[in-house]
Image: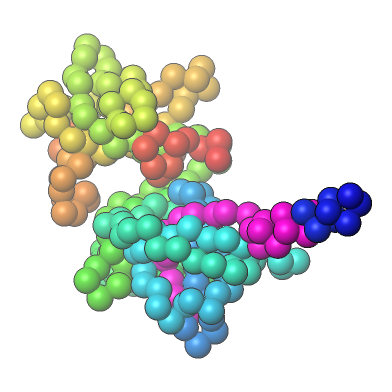
């Protein structure tokens, strides 16, 4: 009987996964190093060691069966491809800025973003990025927000409802009511339109609109129809309503 129990435990042990399950979007692939960088959440990028690196591509959604190594990176025993993302959100630190390129560091990986970057953006700044995945696996900066831990906020993407002194943005997960500061021009936006709303959280906990852009725009920066330069805030891209508490 004892031998049967031990044999059963051995079978269970062999059937158990080699590591915990993690998931995310591939940000960078380094086949020669058997390494990829994965955006696991809008605020967390992690390096992953995997022999599958040669068959992986930027923008793929993956599930990882992995264990955490002493240096904080992951070692994946199995990688499963679950689809492809058109865009990816992640937090990073600015390394260098040129008029048409931004180099950032995220989770130990150096990421190059094509597109116009703010000239005043200083190296060392922490930024929240929305990047579009190109056909050649390059990343194009779509939206960039400087992260300020003293002014938490976020970005929500969804359908717009315009109220009196506020807007409501309804995503697949939630609806957020966001106050509209005096002087913020909503002209050109219509009820039910798909939008990206960047917001800051005020000391009293209320949300205040910082930036509003059409969600279908190819270049968000060219369509800030409601943005008023007098109302900059510290919003961050948390993706689908995720805020600065991540």
Q: Which colour scheme is used?
A: rainbow
Q: In which quarter of the image is residue 13?
A: bottom right
- Taking the image as shown, residue 41 lies to the left or right of residue 60, namely right
Q: Taking the image as drawn, is residue 43 in sight?
A: yes
In percent of width and height, residue 178 lies at: 33, 22
Q: Residue at x 53, y 61 (%)?
A: 64
Front in this rendered view, residue 125 or 62: 62
Q: Residue at x 59, y 68 (%)?
A: 76
The extreme top residue here reads 164
Q: Is residue 28 magenta?
A: yes
In percent of width and height, residue 87 lies at: 30, 56
Q: Does the magenta stretch include residue 158?
A: no
- Numbered range of the magenta stretch: 9-30
Q: Which residue is drawn at 91% across and 51% down?
A: 2
Whether 195 is drawn above or below 23: the answer is above
Q: Taking the image as drawn, is residue 19 in sight?
A: no
In percent of width and height, residue 220 lies at: 21, 49
Whether 222 is drawn above or below 193: the answer is below
Locate the C terminus by quadrant.
top right
Q: Which residue is drawn at 30% across and 72% down?
A: 138
Q: Quadrant of residue 166?
A: top left
Whether 178 is drawn above or below 121: the answer is above
Q: Quadrant of residue 103?
A: bottom left
Front in this rendered view, residue 80 or 14: 14
In percent of width and height, residue 81 lies at: 40, 63
- Taking the image as shown, residue 28 lies to the left or right of residue 46, namely left
Tally of numbered tags: 0
Whether 170 is drawn above or below 72: the answer is above
Front in this rendered view, residue 40 or 89: 40
The extreme front residue here reads 1
Front in this rendered view, residue 196 or 54: 54
């Amino acid at each position: 009987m004892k031998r049967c129990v031990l044999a059963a435990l051995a079978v269970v042990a062999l059937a158990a996964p080699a590591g915990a399950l993690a998931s995310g979007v591939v940000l960078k692939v380094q086949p020669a190093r058997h390494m990829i960088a994965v955006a696991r959440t809008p605020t967390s990028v992690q390096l992953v060691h995997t022999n599958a690196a040669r068959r992986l591509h930027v923008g793929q959604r993956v599930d990882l069966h992995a264990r955490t190594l002493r240096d904080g990176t992951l070692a994946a025993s199995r990688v499963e491809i679950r689809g492809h993302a058109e865009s990816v959100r992640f937090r990073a630190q600015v390394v260098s800025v040129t008029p048409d390129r931004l180099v950032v560091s995220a989770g130990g990986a150096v990421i190059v973003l094509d597109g116009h970057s703010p000239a005043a953006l200083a190296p060392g700044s922490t930024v929240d990025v929305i990047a579009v995945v190109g056909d050649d696996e390059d990343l194009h900066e779509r939206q960039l927000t400087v992260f300020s831990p003293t002014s938490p906020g976020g970005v929500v993407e969804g359908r717009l409802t315009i109220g009196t002194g506020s807007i409501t943005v309804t995503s697949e997960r939630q609806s957020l009511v966001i106050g509209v500061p005096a002087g913020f021009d909503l002209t050109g936006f219509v009820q039910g339109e798909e939008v990206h709303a960047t917001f800051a959280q005020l000391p009293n906990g209320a949300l205040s609109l910082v930036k509003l852009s059409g969600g279908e725009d190819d270049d968000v920066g060219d369509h800030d129809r409601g943005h008023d330069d007098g109302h900059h805030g510290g919003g961050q891209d948390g993706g689908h309503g995720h805020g600065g508490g991540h």
